Image: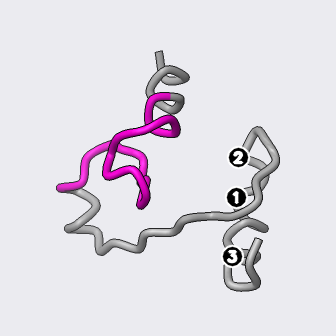
Amino acid sequence: PLQRQKQVLAVMKQHIPHPIHALDLKCMTPAQAETAGDTAFDPHGGGQGVHIRRIQRNKE
């Protein structure tokens, strides 16, 4: 992970089941988070793609 990601990873690592090489972080205000719903942030897929499908499949 990048240096700026290490602080976040140090806190979240126990909640991440697999090794990762980087984190994509999206910071939101509480108001933005309320309207965003319960979706994963995928900056490269526009809400589509392998990562989103895998997350949705794991929720089922």
Q: Which mark is residue 12?
A: 1
Horizontal and vertical percent for residue 54?
53, 29
Mark 3 neighbour class, 10 Å CA radius: few under 14, some 14 to 19, many 20 or more? few
Q: Which mark is residue 5?
A: 3
| Mark in front: 1 vs 3 | 3
Horizontal and vertical percent for residue 31?
20, 68
Nearest to the observer: residue 50 or residue 56: 50
C-alpha span from label 3 to label 2: 15 Å
Q: Is residue 57 above or below residue 9?
A: above
Dividing the image into 4 quarters, which one contains the N terminus? bottom right
Q: Secondary structure at mark 1?
A: helix
Horizontal and vertical percent for residue 21?
76, 60
Question: Decide: marks 1, 2 in contact (CB < 8 A)?
Answer: yes
Residue at the (45%, 29%) spot, across then down: 53
Tag 1: amino acid: Met
Q: Residue furthest bottom?
A: 3
Query: Disc 2 marks which residue?
Result: 15
57 magenta-colored? no
Mark 2 neighbour class, 10 Å CA radius: few under 14, some 14 to 19, many 20 or more? few
Tag 3: amino acid: Gln
Residue at the (73%, 66%) spot, across then down: 9
